[in-house]
Image (cartoon, rainbow, N blue to C red):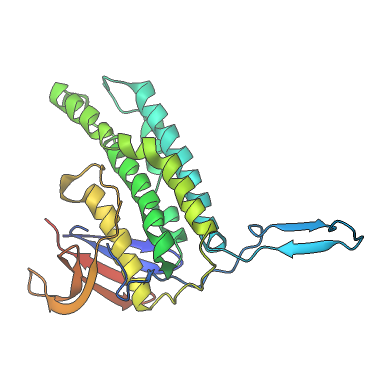
Amino acid sequence: MGSRSVFAAVGVVFALVLVGCESSDGRSVGARTPTTMRAGHGATTTGAPVGTTEPVTTTSAPTALDQLAPFVTAARTLDGQLRAAATAINGAGPPWHTIPASVTNAVNAAATGPAEHALPAGMPASVAQPALLVLSDLESRSASLKDFGRSYEATILDEPMQQRLRANLGFGAVAANDFAADLAALEAAARSTPAFTPAAADSRAGAELAVLEYYVVLENNGCDAHGGARMTTLPRIVWQPGTMPDGTSSDGTIATLPFSATWTNGAWSVVIFAC
């Protein structure tokens, strides 16, 4: 079990133990504070039909890319930070006889929070899965680098530790390789999906998004994981009161794992039991 705090368009406080979801109604996932529609994605063209001199203006309808544009931007920014961190790690080893401050700083600067916070609430299923896949790519890569986010005594960096460091770095390889294609697929899906109105932060959809995001975090970081978990399908969320292994109340399950989600002081407090 575990915990952490996340504040974004929707405030979220996560409690650690491991685990995502399809919406309870099968159509929308997640909820955050409503996002203002952004201009710039609709195309406007002006021209004159053959045989006339009158200009004709055509404006495309808004699409889901308007709501997802902040997430796409945040994802690209984090991709660059993760690449910079990987370059710093590779420049210091292997073997790594010490972990320079330049390396730890680069790793810790590549925080996934801004990308998590940029996801809008109430995403249609057509964009929810590709968006969560992109987020899981980023989380997987971040988790594979986390060993380098701290310094070590030289005596700890022995050969067994060198082997562990190299092995853990490998868990983010697939996500790093597939990120560009996954992000392009998300943008394509968003362009073909009509614009939507984000759900309220404190709604059921908001809770589901909080649970999904924490599931991504825990699959890649919980139970001594170091990345490698990509959300290629949305895990099923079932809302049904029950009891956690520790005797506390649960609100349902995600991928069969019990969870609770409580809206407190403008944030979701999420607990998922995993390992």
Vertical order, 154 against 172 (above or below): above
Q: Indicate the quadrant containing the N terminus: top left, top right, bottom left or bottom right.
A: bottom left
Q: Position of residue 207 (x, y in %)?
A: 33, 72
Q: Position of residue 29 (x, y in %)?
A: 37, 68
Vertical order, 167 against 273 (above or below): above
Q: Residue at x 23, y 41 (%)?
A: 226
Vertical order, 178 against 241 (above or below): above
Residue closest to the far front: 51
Q: Indicate the quadrant containing the C terminus: top left, top right, bottom left or bottom right.
A: bottom left
Residue closest to the far right: 53
Left or right of 40: which side holds 159?
Answer: left
Left or right of 200: which side holds 137?
Answer: left
Q: Position of residue 90 (x, y in %)?
A: 36, 24
Q: Answer whether residue 149 is visible to the viewer in this image.
A: no
Q: Residue at x 28, y 53 (%)?
A: 217
Q: Quadrant of residue 102?
A: top left
Q: Quadrant of residue 40?
A: bottom right
Out of 265 and 257, give the one closest to the viewer: 257
Q: How many marks?
A: 0
Q: Residue at x 31, y 44 (%)?
A: 140
Q: Residue at x 28, y 20 (%)?
A: 94
Q: Answer whether residue 218 is visible to the viewer in this image.
A: yes
Q: Quadrant of residue 82?
A: top left
Out of 95 and 129, give the one closest to the viewer: 129
Out of 36 and 264, give the one closest to the viewer: 36
